[in-house]
Image (cartoon, grey):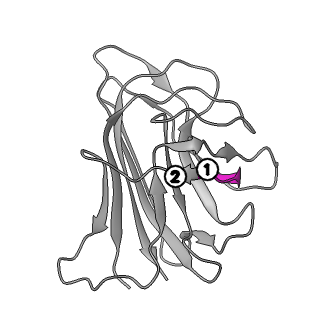
Amino acid sequence: MAKRSFQAATWTPTATGDNTAMANTTYMAIESGASTQGLNVIEIYIGGQATASSVNIMQFARTTTVGTTPTALAAPNGDGPLNGLTQALPTVAVTYVAASTGPLRSTSTTAARLNLSLNVFGGIVRWVAAPGEEWGIIGTTSGLSGSTLSAFTGGSVGLIGAHIVYEPL
């Protein structure tokens, strides 16, 4: 399959506690589109766009509850193939930044999290998985079927832009 980039050009995360529905346009969510679909996340990039020093405590984490009725992405956000020769996917991953009820980040101490904190006054963070160590999302089972890039409580928040590169399996 071909790699894809889910990107949100500019947004301000909101510091949200675990197991709390996230407010629209304060997160990036990615989910499997079907019970048999797998996704491998291979890169996450966050670039600071704030005009003053501000520390965002960002996490890429599993969700215990996925968003209800996700809203389709609208420009300037997007999700598309990196290679222009990519064929249409039989099952499309679900990527969104808004839903009628936002996703809930897992409270489990055994659920995976990536800590991606940065100073958003021009700071950047880029996580790239080593081969065989990609972040896996699979099926529609709660806890494994979705993940979010969002701000955790503490610190302050400022404007960012981000992308998530993934590969449908």
Instruction: Evaluate whether residue 47 shows in this view.
Output: no
> How much space separates mark 1 and mark 2, taking CA atoms?
6 Å
Instruction: Evaluate whether residue 161 shows in this view.
Output: yes
- Judge from the rendering whether residue 56 lies leftward or rightward of residue 50; answer left or right: right
Dot 2 falls on a residue whose secondary structure is strand
What range is drawn magenta here? 61-68
Crowding near pointer 2: few (<14 within 10 Å), some, many (20+)? Answer: some
Q: Residue at x 48, y 76 (%)?
A: 131
What is the quadrant of residue 115 in the picture? top right
Residue type, mark 1 in image: Gly
Q: Residue 108 magenta-drawn?
A: no
As drawn, the label of residue 154 is none
Task: Give the dominant element type of the magenta stretch: helix, strand or loop.
Answer: strand
Q: Which residue is mark 1?
A: 67
Q: Is residue 23 above or below residue 78?
A: above
Q: Quadrant of the N terminus?
A: bottom left
Q: Is residue 100 above or below residue 11?
A: below
Residue type, mark 2 in image: Pro
Dot 1 falls on a residue whose secondary structure is loop
